[in-house]
Amino acid sequence: TAPFAARLKRAELLQVLTRDFATPQDDFGARLLAEVRQLANEQPSALDLQANLAIALSAAAGMEVRARRFAEAIALLERSLALQENLTRQRPADLHFQRNLMLAHAKLGDALKASGPQRAAEALEHYRVMA
């Protein structure tokens, strides 16, 4: 049978990741992220897997932000943003990809801003992209 992450639709994946990354004592979210990452790496041309990986990275970053581990969150969000930019380049007319790209900039801007005033200028750059 297909791995668990491969059977999930994007909305289901986000729901599972949001729930499981909210409870760090359970490592299911981390294992799911690793599985999604492996699937995406095995099939780099599968846009749905790349989109799922971007969502998983963003969800993992949310947990890091809540734990105030901003460097880890920013690294995950930068990777998610790079994936979203690539998806949007490959399908520029896809409104879902456009929306996710905007959200990736917003989340990265928020994490940069939360990390301290020294990163405020970087945060502003991401907010301006959305305007």
Image: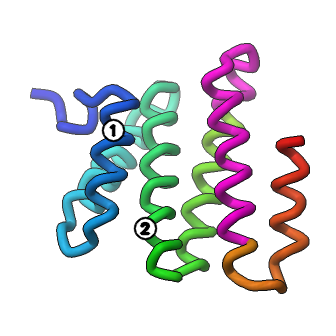
Question: 130 left or right of 91?
Answer: right
Residue drawn at x 45%, y 43% is: 53
Q: Which residue is mark 2?
A: 63
Q: Which residue is mark 1?
A: 13
Q: Is residue 62 above or below residue 103?
A: below
Residue drawn at x 67%, y 31% is: 99
Residue drawn at x 21%, y 66% is: 27
Location of residue 4 (image quadrant):
top left
Q: Quadrant of the C terminus?
A: top right
**Which of 80 and 121 lies nearest the eye of the viewer?**
121
Question: 11 left or right of 4?
Answer: right
Disc ID at residue 46: none
Location of residue 109 (image quadrant):
bottom right
Q: Is residue 102 above or below residue 80?
A: above
Q: Amino acid at mark 1?
A: Leu
**For the magenta stretch, what is the residue range?**
87-112
Residue drawn at x 73%, y 14% is: 93
Q: Amino acid at mark 2?
A: Met
